[in-house]
Amino acid sequence: MSATLPWEVVVLFSQHLDPKILAVASCVCKSWLISMSSNHLWKPFCFYHFPSLSALHLTYPTISYKHLYSLGYVSSSRRLQNPVKPRISLDDLVFIVDVFDGDSHVFSMLKNGEHLSHVNGCDGMFRFDVDVDVDVNAYGEKGLVFEMSKCVRVRWTVVLKHWRGVFVMMDCKGKKGKGSLDAGGAQWFSEDLHSTGCCEHSNDGIGRNGLMAELGLGFSEGVGDSDGKLVEKVSRVEKVTMGVLNVFSCRYVNVDEGLRYLQSFLPHNALSNVSYCKLKTQIVPKVMHLNVN
């Protein structure tokens, strides 16, 4: 009796192996590769797991079932992979909110991203509640005061530190009045965000990525006059809320999702010598990459 098993034994036991072991066995030697790559071995697995891909063999007979199975397996594995961590972090960003009373710029708030991760209401979501000093804001200006009948316009700008890039998340208007406030005394603004792909909007007007920028201004009930009495038709901003909402899932995106969206519009190699003073006096385009001439 021969000391070595006949070649036919390899062919016989290969019919009882699963795809993973077949793939490993095909790496033993060239003869095993040929045997373990046979179409009759891979055809059942391919039709069971990836029937649509298996139909391609009927149209293109030169494509092996092993190759079709590999394509399906790799694509399924990629779908289950966790998203890549964003290249930027909150520490790289500066959030700026400008408010206009009619055509007059009346208020600015600047918040460094590293401080936003610790504010109330974050909880891992790309939604930040920022308390505003009722007397003096970040630029030494007096707190924002509105007459209830005035039209309010807000602009939310995200700046990559060192002015490497600027992206305007929102620039929209709303009428300030009692009827426009929620139960908590806040006025909300929202605007569809640009898609990162080639098609910006679908037919229903919602960005194909389903993302919407949301900004809320929390107002106090009123401001006392010189006699200390409450003036109901005048109010002051006490809180600013910024967030990115996924309208399809009706939830705020998490911080990493928000950063991955922003990095599409904030390239690291963009440089600028533009100062914030210039930005305050201009209508910033929706997307602006700033470069040194």
Image (spheres, rainbow, N blue to C red):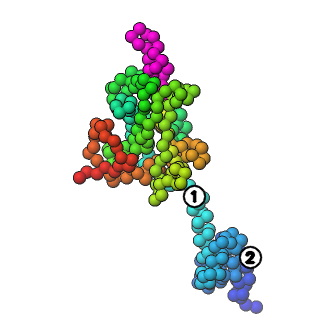
> Residue 2: image x %, image y %?
73, 90
Looking at this view, is 54 or 3 the one in front? Answer: 54
Q: Nearer the viewer, mark 2 or mark 1?
A: 1
Residue 223 counted in the magenta span: yes
* Relative side of 62 to 260, left or right: right
Q: Is residue 186 visible?
A: yes
Image quadrant assignment for residue 108: top left
Kind of residue at disc 1:
Gln
Q: Is residue 22 above or below residue 124?
A: below
Residue at the (40%, 24%) spot, across then down: 145
Q: Which residues are magenta?
A: 218-237
Residue at the (69%, 87%) spot, across then down: 7
> Residue 31: image x %, image y %?
62, 85
Secondary structure at numbered mark 1: loop
Residue at the (52%, 50%) spot, across then down: 205
Q: Is residue 24 visible?
A: no
- To which residue does mark 1 refer? 81
Residue 244 counted in the magenta span: no
Tell me how far mark 2 sits from mark 1, CA to CA. Answer: 30 Å
